[in-house]
Each structure stands twice: as C-alpha cells, then as structure tokens.
Image (cartoon, coloured by chain):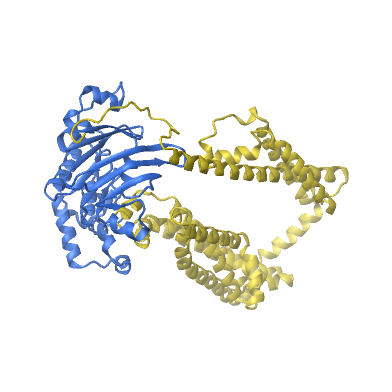
C-alpha cells in the first residue's frame, strides 16, 4: 500500500534564524493514528503547518496522496487543502458565528465565492452539518453562538467543521492542550471514532504520554527540530522518555 | 525501521544550526541583504538626525547672537555639508543612534543584536537626549512665546470687547443660521456615508497581514498606503480649498474634501484593526481550502465589525466638527456664514453662529456616545 503522506528532508528556518525543522523525513500509511510528541518548541506545530503549507517550508518535499505539495500554485494548493482537515489548540472557531455556521464554514473549499459570502447554504449542506454535529453530540447546540460553548464543546465543533470538508487526513495541533483532563479524554475519544469508524488518517501533536499510549497507533518524537524516535507507543520506556524530554522530566499521568 | 525504533542520535536543540548547505546559503544570503539594507537605512537616519542637530544649533545661534528667528538662505547649504560630516563621524561607531534604532527594530537583524544598555551608558543615548533638549528650547524660540503680551492692558481690552459681543447674540438671523447648520450636518453625513463602504473595501487591501502573499499584492499594499498617507497628511481644510477651485465654492466642495480625508483616515484605522486580529481563525478557514475572499469574509470580518463601527462613529464626530470649519474656506454651510460675518466684524452675529455650532456639536457628541454605549 502507498503511504498517504510522505515527508522527506523537510527544513524550516524562520526569519528570526530559528531552525525549527531540520531534515525531517516521515511516512504515514492510510488509517494510521500517528502521535507527534516532543517539548514545546521542538517543531511539532511547524511540522503540521508545513504539510498543508499554512507555513511555507524552506526546503525538502511533502507528498500527500502522491502529489508534491511544496511546488503547488495557490489554486491547486487550495484543492489539496480540502482533503486535509485541521483542528487547533485554541479551537479557532469564529466566536461571533453560530455553531452551525462554524461547521458549514468547513465546506467553503467547494463552495462558490458569491453564495458563501451571501451565506446561502443548501439543505443538503445543512443536513450534513447537522449529521456531523450529531456525531460529536452537539446537535442541540447548533444555533448557539460559538463562544457560549465550553472549551471541550468548542473543540468538538472544530472536529465537525474539519469533517465537513470530507478530508482523507486530519491534522490535530495540540487538540487537548487547553482542556482539562476529563474533557481531554472526551475529545480524544471523538478523534478515535473519526479514525476507526470513518477511517480518516490522523496526525496529532500531543503533550501527554498517557494519551499517546491510550489512543494512537504510532509515535514520532521531535527534539530540536529533528526526529529522535519513531515506533509504537509502548516502546517508549523510561530511557527513551528521558532522551525525548530531558533528564529532569517526569511523566505526568492524565486519567 | 517500520515498527522498531530508529537509531538514536543525540541532537541538542540550538539556533542557527544548519545541516543542509543549500538551506544555510539561502538564509545567510537573506541575512546579508537585510544587513546591507539596514546599514543604508541607519546612515540615512543618522544623516537626518545630524541635520536636525546642526539646524537646531544654528537657529539658536541666529536667535541669540544675530537676533533673527529665521535662517538666511545660504545657511541651509552648509548645514547639509556639516550634517554629512557629523553623520559620517557618528557612523564610525557601531552604536550610532540610527544604527541602534534600525537594527533593534528589524525582524531579521534583531536576532543578531546582542548588546543591551541603558541610554545614559552610551554616547548615542546622550545624543538622543541632546536632541530632545534642543527641541524644547527650539519650541520656545520659534513660537515667539511672549507671556507679558497676553496680559497687557491693550490686549485685555480687545478681549473684553469681543467676548461681550459674543455673549449678546443677534437672534434675528437665527433662522438663517439653522438653515446653514442643516446643510453642514448633511455635508458631514454624506461625506461619512460615502466614505464608509469605500474605506471598508480598500482597508483589506492595505493590511499588511492580508497582502503578504505575492509581489503584486505587496505593491498594491505599498501604493495604497502611500496614497492614503499623502491624502491624510493634507488637512481637509486644504482639500476644501482645492475642491472650491475644482467644483466652485459651496457645500459640494466641502463634502468632497471631507469624504476624501475620511476615506484615507478610516482606511488606516480599519486596516490597523485588521492587522491586530487573531490569526487562528484565518488559519482554520485557510485549512479548509477556502479562497482569499472567503477567508476574509469568514475569519477577518467577524473579528473587526464592532471596532469598525466604533471607529466610524468616532469619524462621524470629527466630520461634524470639520464640516463647520470647512465653510471658512469655501466649503459651504454654517462656516461660510461665519466667515461672512467675521469679515464684516459683526461680532454679535458671529456670537449667534458660534453658540449654535457649540450646541449642535455637543448634541451630536451626546447622541454618538449613547449609540456607542448601546453597541457594546
């Protein structure tokens, strides 16, 4: 089987001179739930954003479903982005819009400019948005303003929004880092459902090792912009943990 | 390697560590270019500051030694030369004022700068202080400040004459004043109403964070910024003079002047608001594959509508005030009336007009304050 995503020799140097990614190579197979771990500033967020080019990589190649992403002109890039959903640490919902409108905005990639600016949505689009809201258990909140929801609920709306674009892969940038432990599990369970039931490939940046062990199928660890570990979650023993997070680090359990 | 662990190599996280020579070349190349540009800017800034210093000292010399406030023509020529010498001397120091100011604020060069010091520890700090002190003294000299004149018997008599006329208004012209005032209010209203949609559309095109995607867009950004900065730096009063020649004296000239200035001001305020929004929602909408217009409509506009409304009301307040003044130079409305009576030295009639303006402006301020409260 061909990998859905193939990153090779990827570099990113910011204008400030920080070498955020250095020679990162990575293969992801369809259906995987891949965790990317590492300290803050190790390049996890940069790596995810270089895949859909929210950040332009400095050098190297990113192949998604066989298409070289780094060379694509804007129009083709937008077409490829539709196949890659993304959720964020800060949820990034439009706070003043309703939950339903937020979910509908996930489908903008396939919508003509005029009707999206006018806010005209077909009944099929509405039904689809309601179906995904139902899947994350928030159908009854559809007409509330997004900022009236709790953090965990907002992240679930963000998942529904990402699904609205019918992606083949989801990028999740620290999806539970601003949530409390019990809501974290609820959000991770929905992601697991998206992975197992809908068969979407997921790349997920995570802080907590316990979440990695519980939900993901494979782990990549970044340190100083380079990959230092690649393997199954249960292979990360004490020694590996110290190498990835530093000698002083201690594992924090999240129940 | 598929399921096992990759060979572990210890790599410490560190800045400016290059593994790929190609990557390194592109970065150091950009750094070199930025440095060259920074040095040029720094020298120009040093030159401007030196010129100001020479100018200030020369002006003070002429004021105190020659008892003249203005400089003779040839002075400007040799001042330019002297400033060049001063700036060249300054530039030998790595901490000349221009270099410190440019290098500390540049995105790329800032990371290379390591020096940090208090202003009084370096010569450039003292130079900055000298420029500040010079400015204060120049302010006193060039405005020809003369406090005894303000409180002389002759001056006070004139003040008493005009104040007593102003507070005894001639109410027989009241209807005429009200008619002119209505015209003035509509000058302000029309100018604001036309300026809002134009400034709204253009403000997105002069926001740095939205126009940073291609060289064409950056050119449009720079061109619009320049145009607006120029339009804004010419006061509405001067635009009114220009339009009163263009379309003739009257309310139309005043409205055009106010509208033009409002577009430039609102576009600047709007675009500054756009530049300060949260980038998160933009990323989220971009990630869905949306095009630029959709991104702006769905992630930028919802974040800026309320601040835009507040700026617009603020601008309306300014326009009401400006509309009364603009008539003084041929912009129509109550200002033109004021100018006519002032020219005839009919101070009681002038008093009527001034009182009406004061009441109307106060009333409009009060209403817009209430509207603002209701919005937030």
Q: Quadrant of residue B233?
A: bottom right
- Residue at horizontal 67 percent and vertical 37 percent from the top: B128
Q: Quadrant of the C terminus of chain A?
A: top left
Instruction: Return the x and y of residue B127 as percentages of the image width and height.
Output: 69, 35
Q: Quadrant of residue B290?
A: bottom left
In the drawing, does residue A126 fall left or right of residue B226?
Answer: left
Reply above or below: B51 against B375.
above
In the drawing, does residue B21 fall left or right of residue B286?
Answer: right
In the drawing, does residue B191 fall left or right of residue B131?
Answer: left
Q: Which chain is blue?
A: A
Instruction: Return the x and y of residue B19 as percentages of the image width and height.
Output: 41, 34
Q: Nearer the viewer, residue A255 or A31?
A: A31
Reply above or below: B103 against B270.
above
Instruction: Return the x and y of residue B247 as percentages of the image width and height.
Output: 62, 78
Residue B356 visible in image: no
Instruction: Return the x and y of residue A121 as percentages of the image width and height.
Output: 23, 66
> How many marks can you see?
0
Q: Colour of chain B?
A: yellow
- Residue at horizontal 27 percent and vertical 65 percent from the top: A111
**Which residue occupies the extreme right position in the image?**
B66
Q: Nearer the viewer, residue B14 or B176?
A: B14
Residue B22 visible in image: yes
């Amino acid at each position: 089987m061909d990998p859905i995503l193939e990153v090779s020799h990827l570099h990113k140097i910011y204008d400030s001179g920080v070498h955020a990614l250095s020679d990162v190579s990575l293969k992801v197979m369809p259906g995987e739930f891949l965790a990317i771990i590492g300290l803050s500033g190790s390049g996890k967020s940069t790596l995810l954003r270089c895949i859909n080019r929210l950040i332009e990589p400095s050098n190297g190649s990113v192949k998604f479903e066989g298409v070289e992403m780094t060379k694509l002109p804007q129009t083709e890039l937008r077409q490829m982005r539709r196949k890659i959903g993304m959720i964020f640490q800060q949820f990034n919902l439009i706070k003043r819009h309703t939950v339903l409108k937020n979910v509908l905005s996930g489908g903008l990639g396939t919508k003509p400019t005029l009707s999206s600016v006018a806010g005209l949505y077909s009944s099929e689009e509405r039904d689809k948005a309601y179906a995904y809201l139902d899947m994350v258990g928030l159908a009854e909140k559809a007409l509330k303003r997004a900022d009236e929801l709790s953090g965990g609920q907002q992240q679930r709306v963000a998942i529904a929004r990402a699904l609205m674009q019918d992606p083949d892969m989801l990028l999740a940038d620290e999806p539970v880092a601003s949530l409390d432990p019990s809501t974290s599990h609820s959000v991770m369970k929905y992601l697991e459902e998206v992975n197992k039931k809908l068969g979407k490939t997921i790349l997920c940046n995570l802080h907590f090792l316990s979440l990695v062990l519980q939900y993901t199928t494979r782990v990549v660890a970044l340190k100083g912009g380079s990959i230092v570990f690649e393997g199954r979650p249960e292979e990360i023993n004490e020694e590996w943990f110290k190498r990835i997070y530093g000698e002083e680090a201690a594992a924090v359990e999240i129940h | 390697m598929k399921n096992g662990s990759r060979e572990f190599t210890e790599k410490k996280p560190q800045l400016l560590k290059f593994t790929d020579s190609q990557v390194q070349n592109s970065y150091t190349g950009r750094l070199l270019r930025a440095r060259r540009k920074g040095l040029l800017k720094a020298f120009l800034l040093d030159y401007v500051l030196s010129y100001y210093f020479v100018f200030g000292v020369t002006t003070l010399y002429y004021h105190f030694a020659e008892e003249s406030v203005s400089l003779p023509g040839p002075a400007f020529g040799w001042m330019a030369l002297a400033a060049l010498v001063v700036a060249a001397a300054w530039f030998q120091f790595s901490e000349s004022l221009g270099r410190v100011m440019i290098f500390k604020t540049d995105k790329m060069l800032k990371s290379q700068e390591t020096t940090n010091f208090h202003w009084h520890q370096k010569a450039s700090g003292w130079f900055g202080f000298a420029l500040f002190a010079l400015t204060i003294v120049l302010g006193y000299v060039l405005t020809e400040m003369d406090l005894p004149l303000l409180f002389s018997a002759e001056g006070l008599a004139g003040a008493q004459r005009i104040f007593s006329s102003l507070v005894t208004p001639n109410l027989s012209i009241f209807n005429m004043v009200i008619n002119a005032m209505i015209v003035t209010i509509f000058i302000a209203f029309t100018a604001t109403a036309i300026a809002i949609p134009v400034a709204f559309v253009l403000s997105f095109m002069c926001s740095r964070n939205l126009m940073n995607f291609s060289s064409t867009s950056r050119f449009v950004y720079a061109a619009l910024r320049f145009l607006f900065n120029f339009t804004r730096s010419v006061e509405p009063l001067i635009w009114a003079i220009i339009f009163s020649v263009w379309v003739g004296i009257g309310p139309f000239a005043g409205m055009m002047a106010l509208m033009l200035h409002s577009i430039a001001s609102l576009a600047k305020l709007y675009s500054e608001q756009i530049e300060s929004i949260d980038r998160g929602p933009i990323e989220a909408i971009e990630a869905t594959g949306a095009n630029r217009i959709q991104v702006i409509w769905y992630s930028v506009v919802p974040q800026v509508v309320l601040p835009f409304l507040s700026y617009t009301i603020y601008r309306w307040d300014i326009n009401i005030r400006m509309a009364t003044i603009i008539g003084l130079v041929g912009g129509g409305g109550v200002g033109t009336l004021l100018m006519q009576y002032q020219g005839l030295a009919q101070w009681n009639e002038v008093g009527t007009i001034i009182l009406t303006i004061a009441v109307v402006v106060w009333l409009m301020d009060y209403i817009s304050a209430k509207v603002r409260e209701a919005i937030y």
